[in-house]
Amino acid sequence: MAARRFPLLLFAVVPLFASGWRYYGGDSGGTKYSSEKQINRTNVSRLKVAWTYHTGDISDGTTYVSRSAFEATPLVIDGVMYFTTPFNRLIALEAESGRELWSFDPKLDKERPVNLFVHRGAAYWTDGKAARVVFGTLDGRLFSIDAANGRPDPAFGGKGVVDLRNGVADRFPGRGYGMTSPPAIYKDLVICGALAADGEPRGPAGDIRAFSVRTGRLVWTFHAVPRPGEFGNSTWQGESWKDRAGANAWSMLSVDEDRGIVYVPLTSPATDLYGGDRKGAGLFGDSLVALDASTGKRLWHFQIIHHDIWDYDLPAQPVLTTVVRHGKKIPAVAQITKTGFTFVFDRYSGKPLFEIEERAVPASEVPGEEAYPTQPFPLKPPPFARQSFHPGELTRITPETRAFCEKLMKGAVFGTLYTPIGLKPTVLFPGTNGGANWGGGSFDPETGTLYVNSMDVGMVYQMVERPQGSEIPFRPRGVGSPNSRFWDKNQYPCQEPPWGHLTAIDLNTGEFRWRSVLGVVDRLIDKGLPPTGAPNLGGSIVTAGGLVFIAATNDSRFRAFDKDTGKELWSTRLPASGHATPMTFTGKKSGKQFVVIAAGGGNKYNETYSDALVAFALP
């Protein structure tokens, strides 16, 4: 029987075409869309593991003080897969088999404490002759690696590496500065944001910089905190702009390659929960900024949060889309936020495509703090995450959880969106992780739909005085719960479920197409409760096969949803939770479509750790 089938198998594996995943977000605009449709609604339930690769790069906090988070999304170009590990190693695999081709180790100092060992991926550049894989490291180095052999490019910087700390962190040698997200590529430029320390007001600058991919030479710099004489400096009282930390872009940037525009999601100025020493709106903190990708010149901006005192960074890659208004196609950019809002702008003019109102918000009771009197509220789309809480919504999921949460919120203030953290314990939604986070959204050009995963986990803080002589007089203190979050010791949120959603937003109309509960808590399922949704970090992709693929949840599941209805069509268990964004490609040799997810667990929500990169395909 096997001998008679062999010729048919040979015929079946001749590929009609092959496709890759050239950018972190699928394309330079971060849509995370694939035209692949071999895997579709009718057969997705048959997906099986094709191969698993173990990186060996894992930390649960025992050998090293810091823990690991495997958040990478691989690239696939010409049959080769490139991805980064939590220890910032760059690895190349044969994409269809998972066989290692080479690896490059930047020799990260793993004894030095960091928030997490984490890295989300690399960028790829080629001029048709040379090909390079470019990525930054947690300790502030930018590498250019020959895609063919894994060796540093000797023409780039000093033997293949540029010290990113030069020019932005010189005055702060002991403060953290590095890259956890891939840079953006435009022509021969590598455009970099950074992860910068924000625990103290002064520190490394969050500037956006572009380097030559051929030489490593600095080409341009955009000052995220404007200096005297630059637009926006007047939004900082006195000299509060000087050496201001934060206002960086730790997430992914997007590039409109046709127009030569790079879109930058900036974050909160430091410190991120107290701003009494930085009165004013504080541009370009928490702003979406459009820059000329060749020069770094500001083209337009929109400040999504004025004077951020909630750590509501713009966490996600701007999504470059096309929306339809009155029969006319409009190039657009959609910015997902921790607050649960989706802001949609004309990509070239910066004009909002849905009306945005400046609304009055509460003042701060903290001495010296001046909360900004208004904040922007988009009228559409509706918020995709919880933005307030009142005691009548307290969970009844278990008696123990309810009792814990009743104690946690005793004497607390229950704020609405943009209520400042006060001198009493303050319960606020969303928490500092969102809402949405760096997973952002995926966009289906066939239907104009944006898919966003989110969670409803609040935060509980109060402001307390710091010792006399401190640089700032107040600091936030978490109240009573693990990580200052509004949940119990089992990480069951204190409000009634659902606790996590996947939402489909029609960007043409600003309305929801559907919402599905995302994630389960196995212990509650075992008690007979319906799916509650779960905390999640990571993102989705959408395919022409009619599917939205997403892991993200802390329940160790990888799922596929019908992109039109939100119905869950497939779910499988992973070695650990997949706090990453998947990708998909079709193999050059087999003609098979693969879907790949990093399953590292750990992160902020798990005690199970793994180092597995898992590929799925049809049998």
Image (spheres, rainbow, N blue to C red):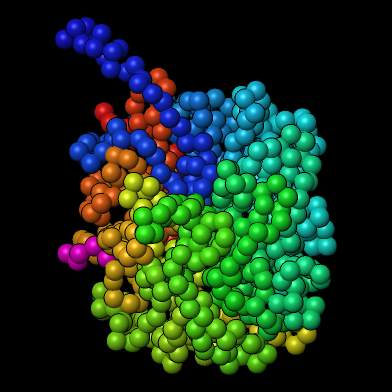
Q: Is residue 83 above or below residue 364?
A: above
Compared to residue 524, the image places residue 387 above or below, namely below
Q: Give coordinates of residue 97: x percent, y percent.
A: 42, 25
**Residue 596, position as x, y percentages in the image:** 40, 38
Which residue sits at x=32%, y=40%? Answer: 544
Let me know if residue 6 appears in the view.
yes
Question: Image check: 560 left or right of 528?
Answer: right
For image coordinates 51% across by 70% down, the residue present is 432
Q: Residue at x 30, y 12 (%)?
A: 10
Q: Give the residues drawn in magenta, as a range.
A: 528-535
Residue 462 seen in the current view: no
Residue 510 in percent (x, y) is at: 36, 65
Instruction: Look at the picture and state if 509 lies above or below 48.
Output: below
The quarter holding residue 502 reads bottom left
Magenta stretch, overall SS: loop
Task: Please tell me which residue is depicted at 60% across the width and 47% down the height of the picture.
Answer: 259
